Amino acid sequence: MKYIAEVDGLEFPVEILDEHHIRFGEEILEVDLAAVSGQPLYSLIVNGESFEGYVYPNEGDWQVLLLGRSYSVKIEDEREKRLQASEAGLASPGQEFILKAPMPGLAIAVQVTEGQQVEKGQILIILESMKMQNELRAPYGGTVVRLKIKAGDGVQQKQILLNLVASSSLLA
């Protein structure tokens, strides 16, 4: 799976090769990441070197404290990012958006119900994958017309999670 990691405004390509190997730019790294139970603390081992970092969710991205420095980090599926960039600003009343899982994981929270009005940027679903929580947000305002999962459901990459129909008053 390929992702774009945006760290303090700089973009880096990241590809997950298997459970313990990633490609970061051109370099292949051996990694192990483990959460410390009940804490925002993570143990990270990269090519045999150990690090501890604190990870906090923050309105669409993550705040990461590593080696005494705080970073703003956003992770996006490479294909989804390109698609969203090409569709930005193209919503029209009645247009339907199909939210698909960007990666396999577990739906730990479903923040909406069928028929609910939502605003642009509102959190719809929180998906946990590889020990990280990902907030899936509304690309524009509208109405949730179909909800296909509930909290606790396992999902596959590209599985349809919900359908959202744009409303004329909520496009901004």
Image (cartoon, grey):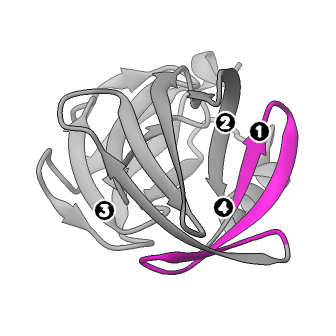
Q: Does label 3 or label 2 sit earlier along the sequence?
A: 2
Task: Decide which of 89, 73 is in the foreground and name it.
Answer: 73
Q: Amino acid at mark 3?
A: Gly
Q: Is residue 140 above or below residue 132?
A: above
Quarter of the image for residue 164 reads top left
Q: Which of the two discs, 3 and 2, sits closer to the camera?
A: 2
Q: Does label 1 or label 4 sit earlier along the sequence?
A: 1
Q: Secondary structure at mark 3?
A: strand
Q: Which of the two discs, 3 and 1, sits closer to the camera?
A: 1
Residue beneath label 3, please? 105
Task: Decide which of 90, 38 is in the foreground and name it.
Answer: 38
Q: What is the CA distance from the residue labelled 3 to the residue labelled 1?
A: 23 Å
Q: Residue furthest bottom?
A: 17
Residue beneath label 4, please? 80
Give residue 106's position: percent from left, percent from top: 24, 56
Q: Residue furthest front?
A: 49
Residue beneath label 2, please? 73
Q: Amino acid at mark 4?
A: Glu
In which quadrant will I find the N terminus? bottom right
Q: Residues within 10 Å of mark 2 (few under 14, many from 20)?
A: many
